[in-house]
């Protein structure tokens, strides 16, 4: 067995809440920042060394489709990480191991299906979202290459989730740094050195993801803790899969609905031309620093709450939510201010086209100031998922974020056409959803209901 001190570090059910939460949060944040860095590096290298069309191909409709597919299946797998966090808190090592091996086998199976299907469906999906005709061939090429790496991508995301669920947020950070540096090096080699263009970015991503998957799986194979991966035990245990999918399907559907609503928005953006698509893409690459920060808070509180819930420490769980929400709100205000103040210099890293930079800066001013509202959605929904209450929050988010956003595009945009109206769909949908989730969290009996279910 690994030494006892390591196990105590990973135990989120003991120690000062604020200190323990921050120590757990920062490796997650730095890891996701590195993940965002290598995504942004793709855009920077393509935008500066290939051109605006290539930037739009990599970061426009193709990016939204990738988020839809990968986000859905990662959402499915997240159900297993919630169960694993609860098992870690309850010290139920047998169930933890059974769930771990089930979800790894599930990822191998589903990843192979997605890889095969994506090759044939990529052109159809891009036409469905009205990808501009002048970039659809490049977008198709990028999608087909990217999805050849579906299995390693899913294995890395799931493996990292498992490590965080047992309280280890440091190893995923190390693996992401290795992945990021490899991706940047391969981007420069394939795009600048070999002049492979969009294909070079795609293959650099696939190879770097394969490396990260090997690293995380190797770590799980070598450990002597309860989350050890034993290859001969890889099989789908259907009761474990069913339990994990009960939570995971909700997260997967929620992620898919986010992406579908973004596809609708991307389709509306595509109607405005390649320059606007490039500006929208540049914006998404720069403000990604906020999204990874917010997502890091969500990941941290989900694991923290899961362990505390599994251990039956409900007051500690509630305190951790209050502390996490205060941290998330503070970071939202700070990052929003910085992104607005330095929008033009930051955007110039992604594109050297003055018109693209100017339009992207305007887009950011329209919705970045509302980021603090999203903190409530991220922290509260992640908390509820951590105790296994996934279905009702999913319905609230789908109605408030996804459906409302789609209705905005279908009914408000025709009356007030333009990128400004599209941009405002975000803060409006966030505000409605945040209010609904706050009411649910503070007024409903979700904890008593989940406790009775667990018993």
Image (cartoon, helix red, strand yellow):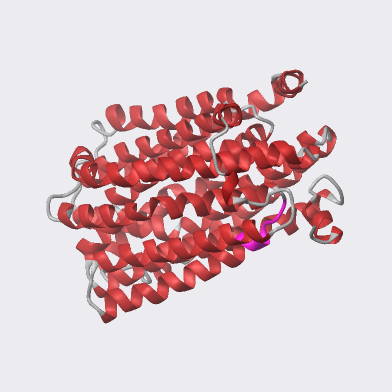
Q: Is residue 397 left or right of residue 198?
A: right
Q: Find residue 90 and report its horizontal and vertical position in percent.
A: 80, 37
Q: Nearer the viewer, residue 322 or 312?
A: 312
Q: Find residue 93 and report its horizontal and vertical position in percent.
A: 75, 41
Give the extent of the magenta segment: 167-172
Please, is residue 36 above or below residue 112 in the view? below
Residue ranking furthest to the bottom: 193
- Residue at x 45%, y 45% (from the top left corner): 108
Residue ranking furthest to the front: 232
Judge whether residue 168 is colored magenta.
Answer: yes
Q: Find residue 79 and report its horizontal and vertical position in percent.
A: 58, 35
- Residue at x 25%, y 64% (from the top left corner): 198
Q: Find residue 402 and report its horizontal and vertical position in percent.
A: 42, 31
Q: Is residue 418 visible?
A: no
Name the quadrant of the C terminus. top right
Which corner quadrant of the image does residue 13 belong to? top right
Which corner quadrant of the image does residue 439 belong to? top right
- Residue at x 83%, y 32% (from the top left corner): 312
Please, is residue 203 above or below residue 255 in the view? below
Please, is residue 196 above or below residue 66 in the view? below
Judge whether residue 440 is colored magenta.
Answer: no
Q: Is residue 436 left or right of residue 73?
A: right
- Residue at x 82%, y 33% (from the top left corner): 314
Q: Is residue 31 visible?
A: yes
């Amino acid at each position: 067995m690994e030494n006892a001190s390591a196990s105590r570090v990973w135990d989120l059910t003991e120690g000062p809440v604020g200190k323990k939460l921050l120590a757990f949060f920062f490796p997650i944040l730095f890891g996701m920042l590195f993940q965002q860095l290598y995504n942004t590096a793709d855009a920077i290298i393509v935008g500066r060394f290939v051109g605006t069309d290539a930037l739009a191909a990599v970061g426009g409709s193709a990016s939204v489709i990738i988020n839809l597919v990968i986000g859905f299946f990662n959402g499915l797998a997240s159900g297993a990480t919630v169960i694993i966090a609860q098992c870690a808190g309850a010290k139920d090592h047998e169930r933890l191991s059974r769930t771990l091996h089930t979800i790894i086998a599930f990822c191998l199976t589903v990843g192979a299906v997605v890889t095969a299907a994506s090759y044939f469906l990529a052109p159809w999906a891009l036409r469905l979202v009205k990808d501009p005709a002048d970039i659809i061939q490049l977008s198709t090429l990028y999608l087909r290459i990217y999805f050849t790496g579906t299995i390693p991508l899913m294995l890395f995301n799931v493996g990292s989730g498992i490590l965080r669920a047992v309280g280890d947020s440091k190893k995923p950070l190390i693996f992401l740094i290795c992945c990021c540096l490899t991706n940047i090096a391969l981007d420069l080699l394939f795009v600048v050195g070999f002049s492979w263009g969009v294909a070079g970015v795609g293959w650099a991503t696939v190879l770097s993801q394969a490396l990260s998957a090997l690293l995380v799986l190797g770590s799980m194979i070598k450990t002597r803790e309860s989350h050890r991966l034993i290859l001969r035990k890889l099989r789908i245990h259907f009761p474990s899969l069913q339990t994990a999918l009960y939570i995971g399907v909700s997260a997967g559907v929620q992620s898919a609905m986010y992406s579908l609503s973004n596809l609708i928005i991307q389709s509306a953006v595509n109607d405005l031309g390649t320059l606007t698509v490039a500006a929208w893409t540049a914006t998404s690459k720069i403000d990604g620093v906020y999204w990874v920060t917010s997502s890091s808070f969500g990941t941290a509180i989900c694991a923290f709450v899961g362990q505390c819930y599994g251990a039956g420490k409900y007051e500690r769980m509630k305190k951790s939510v209050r502390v996490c929400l205060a941290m998330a709100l503070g970071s939202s205000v700070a990052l929003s201010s910085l992104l607005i103040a330095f929008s033009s210099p930051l955007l110039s890293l992604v594109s050297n086209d003055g018109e693209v930079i100017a339009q992207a800066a305007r887009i950011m001013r329209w919705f970045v100031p509302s980021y603090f509202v999203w903190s409530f959605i991220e922290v509260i929904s992640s908390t509820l998922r951590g105790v296994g209450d996934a279905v009702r929050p999913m319905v609230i988010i789908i109605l408030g974020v996804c459906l409302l956003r789609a209705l905005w595009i279908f009914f408000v945009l025709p009356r007030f056409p333009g990128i400004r109206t599209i941009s405002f769909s975000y803060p409006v949908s966030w505000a409605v959803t945040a209010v609904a989730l706050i009411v649910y969290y503070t007024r409903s009996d979700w904890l008593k209901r989940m406790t009775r279910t667990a018993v």
